[in-house]
Image (cartoon, rainbow, N blue to C red):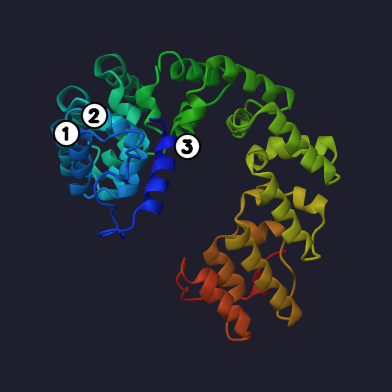
Amino acid sequence: MNLQLCKRLILNAVRNTPKPFNNHCPSSHVLFYSTSELKPTTETNRIFDLLRNHGIAPEAVSSAASVLSELKNPEKCDSVLSFLKENGFSKTHLEKLVNSRPRVLAASLDNTIKPKFQILQYLGISAPDIANIITLDPLVLFRSVDNRVVPSIMVLKDILGSISEVAKLLTKPACSLFLRNDLEKNLLPNIKILRSCGVSTDRIIRTMFMSPRFVLSRPEKMQEWIGMADKLGCDRNSLMFIYAVRTLGSMSSATWEVKWDLFRNMGIPEDKMLWMFQKKPQAFAVSDRKIKEVVKVLLDTGKYDVEYITDEPDVFLCSVEKRLKPRLRVLDILESKDLLKQRPRLSTVYKSSNELFVKWFVFPNLDKDPEIKLLYENAFAKVISKPKSSVSSEDIED
């Protein structure tokens, strides 16, 4: 039974059930099936009850109904769930796993599941981190220990230098992909390609932590993106070169054209756009919506024009709500009350840390306007503590 049919049957069952939920859980197996279409088996009943006994919510059970109906061994399912709970899986972990990959419940505990746990434990990865890794990427459990998992770990150890660094890598988001891919076919060739472009090993390793999908791309795609970066005038000796290649690899050619047209339609000449990409390629990876929002917020101050804004492409990486808006509002208030000797450069506005911005512009004026105090309490107080000394905004260089 496919998932859509299952959902429809569940919806019909809920609508037609005269009795209310008992402890928020529909009784029996009306949750799974319409009796006119498919009769539940004894095994299905037992598995349903077993999952509920393990604390899994009915919604999670229902979403996996088509697969659970095929399970013929409730005892195996019980053993798997018990093992996972004993090894750091929370109720949330279990529900996510049942939703995304219910066939894990039918996997061999001794031959499929335990060996992967033993390897991750050997690496020194904590139980909660192992639970996160498996929940986010259950396919790791179905990879061959001898042909994929162990060889991948050995390759990673050679690159990173130690098992502890391998463990640190694997706990990062999406880095479990390193255990599922043939690193001899993608990672190692890509490292060789990047090194040939002058990218240092340290920077490659940093990129592995930040963007595993990028370094695991097909080598021919890596070569293609590098060629594009070259055509855009990116200097291979620049620290920004690998970011340029990553940015180009993160979008389709159609998306790139849309992004290019967005800046062009703002009146930015092509040579300026090339300069922007070479200086801060990550700005082109920001969504169209975010770019437009940043430009609008800054233009609305009446202090900057588009040309000035695009002189600072880093600004497109800033949070509009958490950084730009509160800081610009503080400066507007100070300026309206003649409390600001000279408005700071845009780079000072968005690049300074929260601590420095508050020290320069907020604390010296905290009691001079109630809105500044409110802005401090809502936008800054949660992330900084009041410094022992403060300086006037007049001491800030333009």
Q: Secondary structure at mark 3?
A: helix
Q: Are marks 3 and 2 in contact (CB under 8 Å)?
A: no
Q: Residues within 10 Å of mark 2 (few under 14, many from 20)?
A: some
Q: Earlier in the sequence, mark 3 or mark 2?
A: 2
Q: Which residue is mark 1?
A: 74
Q: Residues within 10 Å of mark 1 (few under 14, many from 20)?
A: many
Determine the image quadrant of residue 327.
bottom right
Q: Say which amino acid is labelled 1.
A: Pro
Determine the residue positioned at 62% across, 30% down.
Answer: 241
Q: Which residue is mark 3?
A: 210
Q: Pick the residue in front: 118 or 357.
A: 118
Please indicate whether residue 121 sits to the left or right of residue 189 in the image: left
Residue at the front extreme, as displayed = 36
Residue 71 is marked as 2
Q: Can you give x and y, in whole percent of width and height, for residue 66 in the image?
A: 34, 32
Determine the residue positioned at 62% across, 76% down.
Answer: 392
Q: Are marks 1 and 2 in contact (CB under 8 Å)?
A: yes
Q: Can you give x and y, in whole percent of width and height, for residue 322 in the image?
A: 57, 62
- Nearer the viewer's eye, disc 1 or disc 3? 1
Q: Are marks 1 and 3 in contact (CB under 8 Å)?
A: no
Determine the residue positioned at 19% across, 33% down.
Answer: 43
